[in-house]
Structures are given as C-alpha cells and as structure tokens.
Amino acid sequence: MFHSSDPRATLGAAPKASAKAASEFAGAEYARFYAQEPQEQGDFGRTWYARGQNFIVGHSEMAAGGVLARQGQVDEYCIIIPDAATRVQVKTPSEAIDIPGFSIVFVPPGDSTVTVATGGRIALLFSTQSADLNAKCSNAASYATRHPNLPPFQPWPEPPAGWRVRHYSLEIKGEQGRFGRIFRCTTLMVNFLDPRVGLRDITKLSPHHHDDFEQGSYVIDGAFVHDIRWPWTPDMNVWREDQHELLAAPSLTVIPPPSIHTSRSVLPGFNQMIDIFSPPRVDFSEKPGWVLNADDYPMPAKA
C-alpha cells in the first residue's frame, strides 16, 4: 500500500487471474560490497559482483584509465555513471562514444570496452544470461537452484533503429506524478530514484509487494534499512521472520516476490538508491511519461 503522495499509488492492480498464490518463498539477498573482498581487482581497479535471478550488478571503483572489456557479450547491458566528474568512453567494433558523467548507458551485444579516463565509480548491470559473470557473484550459490515465483527470463524487443551505444543524462528534474528517473533497454529497467536528504518520514512509507518479479535495490550513497515481510500460508513450515536490514553504500539487496517491502533512508545528508528490474516492468512502462527513453525501446506486443 502506497501513501497517497507516492506516484505509485496510481498503478493499476495486477489482474486476479494472473497472480498465482505462492506456496514457497526465497529469502532476500544482501551483498555488502564495503564488507567483502572484490571478485576482480588489478591495475584497472576493483569490481564486486552480486546477482538476482535475472540480473547482475557489478560495482566498480576504477583507476584512472582503467578498462573493462566484454567479448562476445550475449545481450545488451547497462552502465551507470553516478558522478558528474567521471568521464567514460565506450567502444564497440562500429563506434567509440565519449560519455559525460551522471549518465546511464546501454551497450549492445557483442564486443565492447569501457574506459574510465578519470577513474571513479561506475556500475555495470547485466542479465544473468552471461554465465561467466554469474559464477563471479558473491551470492552465486544462492541461485544454484532457481528461485520460486519467477517466470523464465524473456528479453524485450530490439530497438527499431538498430543496435548502438545509447546514453542519457541523469540530470532530469522531478515531475509531479512521475516516479524517479526510469530508463529501460531489452534486458533491464533502471530507476535512478530521487535522492533522500536525511531520514525518511516513517509515517509516509510505501509497503508493497510484487507477484512475479524481483527488485534489486542498489545503494550508492548513504544508508537504508530494508523492511521485508513474507506472507503467511497454511503451511507454517515455509513462514519466514520479518527482516529489517541496514545496508550502507555500496550494497545490493535483492527483494524476492511476493514479500512485502519498503526502504527508508537512515542517515543525515545524501542517500541515493537505484532500483533494478529484469526484464523491464510492464506497469511502469504503461504509465505515460514514466520511462524516459520509451521511444527507443518498444514494449512487447503482448505486454
């Protein structure tokens, strides 16, 4: 249930017939990158990996001139450049594009390199169709068995104008009735949420659930408590205790369906979180004006 001031209060409810009652549940996943050793490190910098059922987050702290490369990448991936001072070049066999800071980038399948000229932090988001990256994730063992309540991954349609590097500024002002800054590609939806300065008002929280998709909550500044509650079923053996987990930056929480959840900033100052979904969400995509690059990436015909 959303507070009346939350734009998501206008989302339509899922059709009753589409929501099958869950009889088993997965736990939430918590990756505290600041408390773990990176999965990759070298002259380029350091990278930590963690995953959900359908998506991977790579958090990289890059040295000046550091390069990350993908060869034979199976599908489209995303780069988030959260700081205005960071300069990145993305190169594919057909183009080399200089990307300013505070941008989001979608990179086509195939070979590509990402060079961070200035050094700095970036995030790389992938689908879990990349087996080599799945194996690097700190929580890979959690997904040795597929998590319940999630349909098989299906990518969305290819961009009508063809594959190329596409980048968009995150310097977009909020708008009444719009939720965050949402972008999508064929494999992912990213919501660069409006930051919270100081503690969230606990009388205006937004507990809600998703029937059949995970949510990745990637904290890049400040700290958040994620409050998560699983529904009760007739079988008490599958019940789970409520969780109220504190995660600082950088970190990833993966929230499984159909758990009820909300998040609250808990530090004075600047708190920034990014929500990640794979594949893109239909309900957000159906809201006029919410997906800021919707003209570049069509919805599925049967959505």
Image (spheres, rainbow, N blue to C red):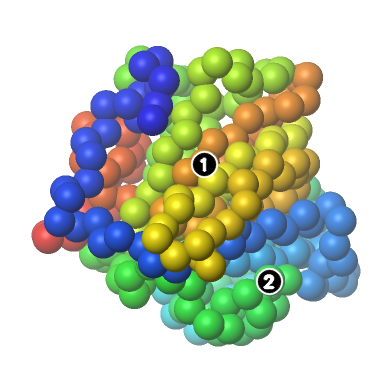
Q: Is residue 209 above or below residue 54?
A: above
Asked whether the beta carbons under mark 1 and mark 2 sit within 8 Å of each other, the answer is no
- Tell me which numbered mark, 1 or 2, is placed earlier along the sequence: 2
* Mark seen at residue 49: none
Q: Nearer the viewer, mark 1 or mark 2?
A: 1
Q: Is residue 152 visible?
A: yes
Comparing 83 with 114, the one in front is 83
x, y percent for residue 86: 71, 43
Comparing 182 with 13, the one in front is 13
Which image quadrant is residue 152 in? Answer: bottom left
Q: Count residues near mark 2 (Cα–Cα under 10 Å), then give few for <14, some for 14-19, many for 20+.
A: some
Q: Secondary structure at mark 2?
A: loop
Comparing 222 with 235, the one in front is 235
- What distance separates the C-alpha of mark 1 from that of mark 2? 21 Å
Which residue is at a point 34% across and 37% down the rendered structure image? 292
Which image quadrant is residue 133 in? Answer: bottom right
Which amino acid type is shown beneath numbered disc 2? Asn
Q: Secondary structure at mark 1?
A: strand
* Mark seen at residue 261: 1
Q: Give the labeled residue for mark 2.
A: 139
231 sits left or right of 117 in the view: left
Comparing 12 with 176, the one in front is 12
Which residue is at a point 66% across and 65% down the rendered structure image? 50
Which residue is at a point 16% across and 48% down the rendered structure image? 15
23 sits left or right of 33 in the view: left
Count of labels in the image: 2
x, y percent for residue 141: 66, 79
Which residue is at a point 73% across and 71% down the rendered structure image? 138
Q: Is residue 54 visible?
A: no
